[in-house]
Image (cartoon, rainbow, N blue to C red):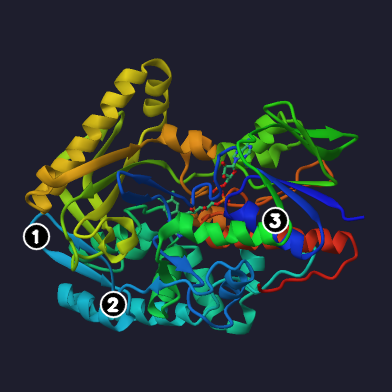
Amino acid sequence: MEKTVVIIGAGIAGLSAGCYARMNGYKTTIVEMHDKPGGLCTAWTRKGYTFDGCIHWLIGSRPGNDPMRQGWEELGAVQGKMMIDHDVFMVIEDKDGKCFTVFENADLLEKEMMRIAPKDAKAIKGFIEDIKKISEMPSGPPERKPGDKTPGFFESAAGFIGFMPLLLKFIQYGAMDIKRLVKRFKDPFLSFAIAQIFGGMEEFSSLGLMFTLGNMHKRNAAYPIGGSLEFIRPIEERFKGLGGEIMYNSPVENIITGDGMATGVLLKNGTVVKADTVVSAADGHATIYTMLEGKYRDKSIDSIYSTFKRFPSIVQVSMGVVMDLAGEPQSINFPLAKPISAGKLTDDRMSLRVYSFDKTFAPQGCTALTTYLGGDYEYWTNLKAVDKKKYEEEKKRIGSEVVDAVDKKYPGFKERVQVVDVATPATYVEYTGNWMGSFEGWLLTPGIMLKKIPRTLPGLKNFHMIGQWVAPGGGLPTGLMTGKDVIKTLCKEDGKEFRAEKP
Ligand SMILES: Cc1cc2nc3c(=O)[nH]c(=O)nc-3n(C[C@H](O)[C@H](O)[C@H](O)COP(=O)(O)OP(=O)(O)OC[C@H]3O[C@@H](n4cnc5c(N)ncnc54)[C@H](O)[C@@H]3O)c2cc1C
């Protein structure tokens, strides 16, 4: 008889685990609280416009033998999918109108950096050489063998041992945050602009930045036309086609345990779904401290959840405008004449994403745009809980301040805006359950890179965790990898050879 697996969450991690579970003969049910798949990897439509909540770049987009690409093909996610490799990743402006264009091609990027800061020639040359070296790395660690222990920094680095001396670069950049990296450049604008590529998150490990630029250089970080939800749909179809079952509108209240084993889940509507194995692909904090009531944890787990830094929450403002913005860079980062504040946070710059490159997002002659502002979690969630009317008014105010700012960039914008949509940290919590509205799990800092996050819990058998809360840095690739890894582990425990196949 087929063994049974229940997976909590139909985000990328849950769907990936579901597909591999079915490929290996496990009777699999995914229980998802929302009415659609995707979790954070989603999009929504308003008045004929599509607003995207996730994919800027997809690591593993380039056809070839790269492990990530192979994984996406196994999930049926990329076959026949139109992808755009942008020439320009973003344009960063300063208050005097000086511009730095972040080209995806490293040679063009070098020329641009030299134009801005010729005195930094030596540092620029080294930076570009390293981007090219890192671009030779595979886009994911070599496949883990069934049952391999959770990799930490050194195990992951050792996975690249065949790529010496890239391994040294992996260690060098892994241990350096972006703040230290940009100090290499004496030119203040260049130094500032490089930090802006990752939204000014200076604590982030510079390996993440170099790895992304390396993948862009080799055309392996494209944007899939149709956006995030259209990227997820074929994976959902693949899971169902393999015989998997998804239960939507099914929030999990508790993970059922007995005799130190997980035996199923209890849904909020009272339904019990029994299984031989429970896999949580949902928020890590809620899994450990709510669904399992904090019964299966130790000091190291408490320390992770009390000391590790998270990606913050955000406010996403999305706009649909009757304006053809073709030819504009896909992303522009510029200073605001009037800073925008909400709660304790103030933004004095804006990163505006102009979706004219995806014609599926807006009617002809129109354009969808999005931007993110800092999201004060306490402020927005309290406001929503105590004063829904004020919460809605605040959303409106933020939306109109953003429109005013964009109007300065594109005169006439304000009169032609047809729709403004504002998602707050409270929205992220409501729709994805992510802790404190975090948009990508654990921030990949040099300190966190050296630590291991367990994927099982002390004293609890037949239970596993996957997704962005067990793989610092988050992102779609970690969903794919951790989802695949857990099924390899189950196969090993059951004495089966792990199988992966393409549709
Ligand atoms: C603005 C933004 C831009 C991004 N850009 C990129 C990018 O360019 N490239 C990239 O690779 N990544 C990007 N990411 C990150 C990426 O979206 C996430 O890291 C990834 O989607 C996380 O997947 P996950 O499956 O681990 O978690 P989630 O997507 O959070 O999925 C968890 C699922 O569990 C469900 N769930 C939670 N609690 C329960 C419960 N009690 N019962 C039932 N179901 C439950 C949720 O509804 C959700 O569907 C971006 C994210 C954001 C927000």
**Residue 126 pos. (x, y %):** 35, 80
- What residue is rendered at 30% in x and 20% in y? 390
Disc sitting over residue 97 in the figure: 1
Which of the two discs, 1 and 2, labels the residue nearer the N terminus?
Answer: 1
Where is mark 2, residue-wise?
124
Give the amino acid at mark 1: Gly
Q: Earlier in the sequence, mark 1 or mark 3?
A: 3
Is residue 200 placed above or below 299 in the rendered structure? below
Image quarter of residue 233: bottom right
Task: State how far apart marks 1 and 2 are (Cα).
Answer: 22 Å
State left or right for residue 124 relative to residue 462. Answer: left
Residue 89: quarter of image: bottom left
Q: Which residue type carries mark 3?
A: Gly
- Mark 3 element type: helix
Q: Residue furthest top?
A: 386
Q: Which image quarter: residue 341?
A: top left
The residue to which callout 3 is attached is 18
Residue lying at 26% horizontally and 52% vertically, measured from the top left: 369
Left or right of 354 in this view: 303 = right
Tell me the mark number nearer the camera, choosing from 1 and 3.
3
Which image quarter is the C terminus in? bottom right
